Image (spheres, helix red, strand yellow):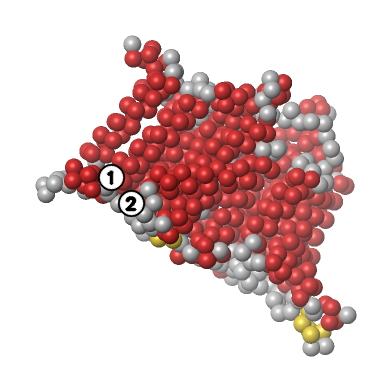
């Protein structure tokens, strides 16, 4: 019964679906130890970025290798603001990061949306590669190599009162950051769930599958593609801001090119163009450090050795290749209950034959 | 005359050309692959880096510089051929995003592997030629034997590739299978073998770029080729991805532009120089400066 109800895909059903998932995630944060809580918080931030990327690739058929760059833009916007105005409400910082991300996305989109696949990928890669040196060079604004330090997220008094009694087994700070991140992610996911099925979402799919037909139906191609880019960049900006707020600092080396590869891997691994794929990607990210440590201990590799330190890069790159070659629809394509709840109509990128 | 050669303007010209030929080589290698298989190889720079590291390991065992160059190029070619056979072949006919994603994954694997095997510290090959600038009546002329070697090696490789495509039977087959694979197959050309050969040639050219980079004073580190790849891609894209001459010209343009932005504008802006050129070039001619206008690609 519930399943048929959820299949109707109304705004209300999507709201309830995301709400249920958020509630489950919140409940889980209370069961987890503080260390796992902060890992989960990072995963939630990354899930937001993955969702944006998933939307861009899965729904608009455009590829971006520059999402670590958009993350950096959002993170620096939030960091620079929070550094100078420590008392502004958090919501404002997030809005600022979203706007900064969207603007940077638009700037990249204007020349890029006239490009197809490889050109676009190269263009965004060039952007992402330029971000780190720029952050290092403009010392007066970005703090250079050292970056910017922000105040750590402060736990509100009521939350502390509620959850840190003298005998409380939970750390109120870790608890608060995890819950906050899950909430922000939940809201982002709700918006995206609606976007998938909105007029824009449908136009986007048409542009992806058959741009000539889309143009004939009156869809403005370059505007639609730019919009997709802006939204993806806004999500990356928000995720980047949250990610750096959790670390209480923004530094150039937080956003290397390899982060773009990691994001792509997690997105492909979870499943392109789906909400649940982004959730899975975020969860995998949360526990990737443990996962890599586990592989190291299984294979008897010393984690402080060269090989151990680079194990994550090797595993993520190999996973990306293997998934793309053998299971391009990602983990979501495997039967699971999450998939049935969040059934997206199109789960695999199959742009109509390009060229 | 000698005062002119010693001016900072000429300094930038020489420096720009020296860096530009490296970009040109990478751009050329991208164009060769693009022409044969319509894949933009995002792991091109990393593959070249890996091959050069293998060569550098051998040089540590006491072989000469030229053996190191030959080994690096041979390893690069082997890697290129294997990559086409194993990673790219299953993806023909799939959406164009798939090979991009796979090569990005390969880029990650190679860079992490190189860092795991050889650490991420910078290494260089003992310079085969002096880096000391020539003197002309007491004035420095900003050309060193190394710069001359670098430019001649790069130009030599480009000429060899051009001659191969233009004058040999293999070159004719390569061009035919890129242009009309079906017809070529009917005429008895083994198209799939041509695709592999295209990748082998391209990876060899790329390896030369990494060898030059490693021979210079800056040396090579595992992620070093990322920036060079981006510059090479921009050069190829400005030239239109289809045109080898465009790629070479684009490489020189990017090299010179970087040098002049660095010298006359601001080092802070230098990382953006390539992107600005790409954006401007694509605004003017989205299909590239050196390609003939085709019909609308649907």
The reply to whether discs 2 and 1 touch (Cβ–Cβ < 8 Å) is yes
Q: Quadrant of residue A91?
A: top left
**Hey, which quadrant is residue A19 in on the image?**
top left
Q: Give percent across and percent down for residue B258.
A: 70, 62
Q: Residues within 10 Å of mark 1 (few under 14, many from 20)?
A: many
Q: Nearer the viewer, residue B74 or A265?
A: A265
Pointer 2 or 1: first along the chain: 2
Q: Residue at x 55, y 26 (%)?
A: A201
- For this orientation, the residue located farthest to the bottom is B138
Q: Which mark is residue A176?
A: 1
Return the chain for callout 2.
A
Q: Could you say where residue A219 lies in the image, as x and y percent from the top left?
A: 67, 25
Query: Residue shown at 70%/53% (left/top)?
Result: B276
Q: Which secondary structure, mark 1?
A: helix
For residue B96, above or below residue A342: below
Question: Could you tell me how far apart the alpha carbons at marks 2 and 1 are, in whole angstroms?
Answer: 9 Å
Q: Which mark is residue A153?
A: 2
Quarter of the image that includes the N terminus of chain A: top left
């Amino acid at each position: 019964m519930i399943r048929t109800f959820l299949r109707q895909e109304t705004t209300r059903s999507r709201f309830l679906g995301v709400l249920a998932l958020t509630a489950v995630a919140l409940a889980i944060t209370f069961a987890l130890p503080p260390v796992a809580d902060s890992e989960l918080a990072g995963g939630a931030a990354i899930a937001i970025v993955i969702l944006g990327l998933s939307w861009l690739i899965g729904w608009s058929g455009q590829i971006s290798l520059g999402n670590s760059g958009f993350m950096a833009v959002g993170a620096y916007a939030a960091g620079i603001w929070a550094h100078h105005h420590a008392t502004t409400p958090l919501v404002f910082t997030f809005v600022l990061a979203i706007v900064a991300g969207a603007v940077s996305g638009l700037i990249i989109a204007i020349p890029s949306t006239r490009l197809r696949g490889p050109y676009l990928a190269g263009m965004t890669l060039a952007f992402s590669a330029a971000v780190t040196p720029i952050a290092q060079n403009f010392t007066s604004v970005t703090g250079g190599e050292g970056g910017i330090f922000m105040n750590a997220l402060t736990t509100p008094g009521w939350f502390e009162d509620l959850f840190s009694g003298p005998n409380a087994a939970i750390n109120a700070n870790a608890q608060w950051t995890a819950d906050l991140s899950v909430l922000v992610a939940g809201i982002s996911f709700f918006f995206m769930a609606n976007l998938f099925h909105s007029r824009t979402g449908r136009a986007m799919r048409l542009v992806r599958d058959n741009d000539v037909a889309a143009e004939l139906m009156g869809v403005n191609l370059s505007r639609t593609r730019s919009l997709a880019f802006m939204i993806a960049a806004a999500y990356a900006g928000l995720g980047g801001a949250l990610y750096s707020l959790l670390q209480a600092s923004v530094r150039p080396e937080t956003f290397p090119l390899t982060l773009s590869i990691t994001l792509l891997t997690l997105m492909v691994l979870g499943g392109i163009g789906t909400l649940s794929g982004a959730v899975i990607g975020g969860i995998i990210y949360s526990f990737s450090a443990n996962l890599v440590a586990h592989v190291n201990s299984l294979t008897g590799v010393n984690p402080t050795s060269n090989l151990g330190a680079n194990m994550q890069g090797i595993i993520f790159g190999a996973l990306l290749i293997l998934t793309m070659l053998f299971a391009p629809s990602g983990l979501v394509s495997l039967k699971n209950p999450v998939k049935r709840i969040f059934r997206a109509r199109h789960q695999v990128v199959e742009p109509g034959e390009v060229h | 005359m000698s005062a002119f050669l010693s001016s900072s303007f000429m300094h930038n010209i020489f420096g720009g050309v020296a860096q530009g030929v490296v970009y040109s080589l990478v751009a050329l290698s991208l164009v060769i692959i693009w022409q044969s298989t319509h894949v933009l190889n995002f792991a091109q720079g990393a593959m070249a880096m890996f091959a050069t590291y293998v060569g550098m390991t051998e040089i540590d065992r006491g072989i000469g510089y030229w053996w190191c160059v030959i080994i690096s190029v041979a390893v690069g070619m082997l890697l290129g051929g294997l990559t086409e056979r194993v990673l790219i072949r299953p993806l023909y006919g799939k959406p164009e995003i798939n090979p991009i994603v796979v090569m990005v994954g390969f880029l990650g694997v190679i860079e992490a592997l190189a860092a795991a095997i050889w650490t991420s510290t910078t290494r260089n090959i003992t310079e085969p030629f002096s880096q000391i600038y020539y003197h002309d009546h007491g004035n420095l002329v900003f050309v060193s034997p190394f710069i001359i070697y670098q430019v001649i090696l790069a130009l030599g490789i480009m000429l060899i590739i051009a001659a191969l495509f233009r004058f040999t039977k293999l070159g004719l087959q390569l061009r035919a299978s890129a242009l009309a694979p079906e017809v070529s197959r009917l005429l008895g050309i083994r198209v799939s073998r041509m695709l592999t050969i295209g990748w082998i040639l391209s990876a060899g050219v790329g390896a030369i770029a990494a060898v030059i980079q490693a021979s210079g004073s800056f040396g090579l580190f595992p992620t070093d080729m990322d920036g060079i790849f981006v510059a090479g891609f921009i050069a190829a894209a400005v030239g239109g991805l289809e045109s080898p001459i465009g790629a070479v010209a684009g490489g020189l343009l990017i090299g010179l532009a970087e040098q002049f932005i660095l010298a006359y504008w601001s080092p802070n802006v230098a990382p953006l120089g390539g992107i600005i050129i790409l954006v401007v070039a694509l605004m003017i001619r989205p299909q590239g400066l050196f390609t003939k206008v085709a019909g609308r690609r649907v």
